[in-house]
């Protein structure tokens, strides 16, 4: 297949790009390489795919040194003209839209970035898919769309109309926009509500990266809501394996669907920290803080629908996943 991966210098996009290339697909990757977190990590991911930092210029196509089937472009989603040109110049079979302005807390102070990327940018992706009659659009939603829901586990049959942050609101908006395009233009689309993805090459603003860095530096961890939270931590390899299965599955019988993609086993924040301490051989210092605006107490994925499509497979345990991350982190 020829696949467009947006956000290919990001955490999930990087791993998906590598997986597609290793199995023989042709990939066009785009990313605006913004400075939401340290650029060095994004460029290091690109280097792993054979794209040199020195070769990157805005709008310029760069061919990978390692993978002849990979081309990267630095490109902003909300650059309407260049996005139109990209879809006009290329003939994609599938689009995996993973680029977005991420982060719940960041959305409290930088709201416009979320409208530019997550709303206007997604509109440009939808228009490109419509005009080129893409066979399947797979896009990133988020468990954040469940917002203030109290019923556990979170199921896609539940309402998701009470977002706790602008970030969550933009992700729910993406689902509604995709629904409209699927209904009007018969665009097959699958929205994936990711649940706290972690692993090697992960985002530095996420708990595992932040906690590991703080413990090694002897700095106190910022433990919000006094540690009384649970998250459905999901290892990156589990995410990627199921995304590949979804791409390879027959087109959705209905042109629009949304799926939870998470391990389905919430872990307390304290247990997660304990696993990090065990792998580092060092105790953490705790700085307890109240609940932050935009946060929720617990996430827990009902993955029945996902397993109906992908089959029931083992998920990486928290113990194994944290160890793999720590091994990578200490080398990196």
Image (cartoon, rainbow, N blue to C red):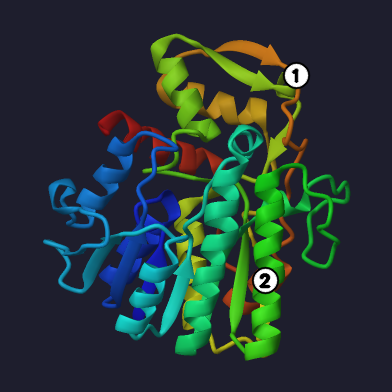
Image side of residue 308 versus residue 202, left or right: right
- Tell me residue 27's x, y (percent): 30, 72
Residue drawn 75% across the image and 25% down it:
291
Farthest residue, direction front: 81
Residue drawn 48% across the image and 10% down it:
219
- Tell me residue 261's x, y (percent): 62, 61
10 Å neighbourhood of mark 2: few (<14), some, or many (≥20)? some
Q: If the image is split into quadrants, where does the N terminus sit?
A: bottom left
What residue sits right under mark 2 in the picture?
Answer: 177
Dot 2 falls on a residue whose secondary structure is: helix
* Image height of 51 relative to 207, above or below: below
What residue sits right under mark 1 in the picture?
Answer: 290
Residue drawn 56% across the image and 69% down it:
123
Say if residue 1 shows up in the picture: no
Q: Quadrant of residue 184?
A: bottom right
- Tell me residue 5's x, y (percent): 39, 67
Kindly report the distance in space between the C-alpha atoms of the residues bearing marks 2 and 1.
Answer: 35 Å
């Amino acid at each position: 297949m020829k696949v467009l991966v947006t956000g290919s210098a990001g955490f999930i996009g990087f791993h998906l790009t590598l997986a597609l290339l290793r199995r023989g697909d042709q990939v066009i990757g785009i990313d605006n390489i913004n400075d939401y977190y340290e650029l060095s990590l994004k460029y290091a991911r690109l280097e792993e795919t054979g794209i040199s930092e020195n070769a990157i210029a805005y709008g310029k196509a760069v061919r990978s040194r390692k993978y002849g089937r990979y081309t990267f472009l630095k490109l902003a989603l909300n650059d309407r003209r260049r996005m139109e040109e990209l879809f006009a110049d290329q003939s994609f079979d599938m689009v995996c839209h993973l680029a977005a302005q991420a982060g719940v807390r960041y959305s409290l102070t930088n709201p416009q970035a979320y409208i530019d990327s997550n709303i206007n940018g997604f509109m440009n992706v939808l228009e490109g898919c419509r005009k080129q009659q893409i066979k399947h659009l797979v896009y990133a939603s988020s468990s954040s769309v469940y917002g203030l829901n109290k019923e556990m586990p979170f199921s896609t049959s539940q309402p998701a109309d009470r977002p706790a942050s602008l970030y969550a609101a933009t992700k729910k908006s993406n689902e509604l926009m995709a629904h409209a395009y699927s209904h009007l233009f018969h665009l097959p689309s699958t929205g994936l509500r990711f649940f706290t993805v972690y692993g090697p090459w992960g985002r530095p603003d996420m708990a595992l990266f932040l906690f590991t860095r703080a413990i090694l530096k002897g700095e106190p961890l910022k433990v919000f809501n006094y540690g009384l939270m649970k998250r459905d931590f999901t290892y990156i390899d589990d995410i990627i394996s199921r995304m590949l299965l979804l791409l390879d599955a027959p087109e959705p019988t209905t042109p629009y669907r949304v799926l939870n993609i998470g391990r389905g086993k919430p872990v307390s924040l304290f247990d997660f920290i304990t696993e990090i301490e065990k792998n580092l051989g060092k105790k953490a210092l705790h700085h307890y803080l109240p609940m932050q605006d935009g946060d929720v107490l617990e996430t827990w994925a009902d993955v029945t629908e996902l397993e109906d499509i992908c089959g029931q497979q083992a998920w990486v345990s928290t113990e194994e996943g944290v160890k793999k991350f720590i091994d990578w982190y200490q080398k990196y």
